[in-house]
Image (cartoon, coloured by chain):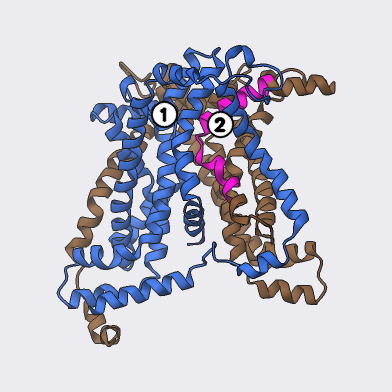
Chain colours: A blue, B brown
Amino acid sequence: MSTQNMTRRAVDREQKSGPEPQQGPPKKRRTSNVNVPVTVLVAVLSLTVLIPLYFTVVTALKSPDQLGGTGFELPTSIHPENFSKAWELTDFPNALLVSGIVTASAVVLTIITNSMVAYAIARNMNRPFFKALYYFFIAALFVPFPIIMLPVTKETALLGLDNPVGLFLLYTVYGLSFNIFVYTAFIKSIPPELEEAAIMDGASHWTSFWKVIFPLLTPMNATVGILTCLWAWNDFLLPLVILSDPATRTLPLVQYVFQSQFNTDYSTAFASYLMAMAPLLLVYLFAQRWVISGVMRGSIK
Amino acid sequence: MSVPRLATGPAKNKLRSQTVNRTFYWMVVPALLLFVVLHTVPALTGIFYSFTNYAGYGEWDFVGLQNYVNLFRDDRILSSYGFTFLFAVTATIVVNIGALFIALLLNAKIKFQTAFRGIFFIPNVLSVLIVGYVFNYLLSNNLPLVGRALGIEWLSTSILTNPDLAWLGIVGVTAWQSIAFSVIIYLAGLQTVPAELYEAASIDGASHWRQFTSITFPMISAFFTINMVLALKGFLQAFDQIVALTGGGPGTSTESVAMVIYRGGFQGGEYGYQMANSVVYLIVIVVLSLLQMRTLQRKEADFS
């Protein structure tokens, strides 16, 4: 009971002390003196994002003979067969499944393992082993992927990891450096008395991590989860060098193969691009506030 | 709630002085092993092979520092470094100025603030490769039309086929995609600036520009440092956008270092040679990141 109360209190405090971007200024101020010229300027600037998206959508709906002109005209007739054609040519359901499995596994495994590692390190920073470990992982932040790309490809092939399993394992360990950075900073703000109390009540370190600490990490788990998801879903170079079987291509990789094989059929190509962008874009449209505040939180810690 | 008080006394010291609980090792060791196998071992074997003439298959011999010497005589390598730096520095500057500007606008008292923030973050949820393909079409078909209509000669053909201008197209597309993320980091920074500071400055009659240079920028300089370091490091690794836009061309004018490593290492039988390139590239990135952090942090200190 006591630990639970403590936990709840710490959560409250965490939420109060952490800057909450969405709540920001009170609504009264926003409606009472809106800066109209700036709003107009922002609206005009937002067209730089919206116009290319609009262009992608209309191009995907046109037949090849409607292309040309400025490209921004609305289609005179809609051609849904572009999508069915792209669906078949790229074997879309399969790529979607591979991307989905890799991304979901990477996110779950990353949150579980990386938070554990960060917790063990954050609570034992005074011990040489854990301190060394911290700097060992942080140092890897400076090692960009292209540098180990050649040997890691050979090694994954050797270990039989040149498949989606190897891919999500790689996302999990390659995210470690950055995530440890984010998690340890956050864990240091959680008073150690919390777990110590649980341990004195008879809980093991293991239970106290899962029952006390892990729930407190929820905001950071969300941040790490969002960033891992965006990375694993959109990444191109890692699947390109790791995956050996064409049947296990991820969505970006399929676009690459598609582009080099059918580079003249632009309508179908755009339908294919749109289908590859759509899943994450839809999720984002519904979870927008959440995604943005998650990313913001990660940068403050 | 007497629990925390109990723990602050001698009990706490007792707990701390115990040897590390074995659970902590179990939490760390599996991930550590995976990391060593998939990150450290490849990095070390890579360094090892950089001293050999290994082609990626078959026999190999030690060649000492021969690969490293050859790198500095290889025009293709040198020009890839030239392009990568030109691109990365320009993109870093463009992205940071653009993102800071947009973040300031989004932080002002505007209508539909949340919706606009949502819109500006969209490019970041899209794959760089696919964004590159879409812009490839726009730049090679639509932009020349605009150029012809306006009678601008250098715009009337695709800039991606022009060896002198293609890099600008890559910078533009990269900026379009990456500004989103930097905007969010700057917005997070702007939220940390207390509103009272602006109120006080307004009472003292400080102009908007003065408020920006004397309050806003110094207060968010840590976020500026983060963004500059992350952006430069990220752009030095450019690969996806180049594959989608120019494929390294025309000729080899937009080949980045990552691309040369990929092509030479996987397709050109230059495994050992490209590993030497990777080692040099790693040293360059580490040195640059550290230098950048030191100078930017010194600036930060000056402000406060």
* Percent coordinates x, y for residue A168 in the rendering: 32, 38
- Say if B201 sits above or below A34 in the image: below
B152 left or right of B165 in image: right
Q: Position of residue A174 (x, y in %)?
A: 37, 43
Crowding at dot 1, Cα within 10 Å, few <14 / some 14-19 / many 20+, comes out as many
Specify the amino acid type for callout 1.
Leu
B139 or A278: nearer the eye?
A278
Left or right, residue A79 beside residue B85: left
Question: Looking at the image, which residue is at 47% across and 51% down?
Answer: A291
Quarter location, residue A246:
top left
Disc 2: host chain: B
- Which residue is nearer to you in this view: A53 or B41? A53
Whether B193 is drawn above or below A43: the answer is below
| Labelled disc at residue A147 | none
- Write down the residue under mark 1: A251
Farthest residue in the left direction? A202
Q: Is residue B291 magenta?
A: no
Q: Is residue A200 above or below residue A152?
A: below
The single residue placed furthest to the right in the displayed view is B151
Q: Could you tell me which secondary element the residue under label 1 belongs to? A: helix
**Residue B176 sits in which quadrant?**
top right
Q: CA distance from mark 1 to mark 2?
A: 13 Å
Check disc 2 and give the amino acid type. Answer: Val
| Magenta span main SS | helix
The span picked out in magenta is: B118-141
Q: Position of residue A82 (x, y in %)?
A: 50, 18
The structure residue drawn at horizontal position 22% and vertical position 83%, both measured from the top left corner, is B11
User: CB atoms at circles 1 and 2 under 8 Å apart?
Assistant: no
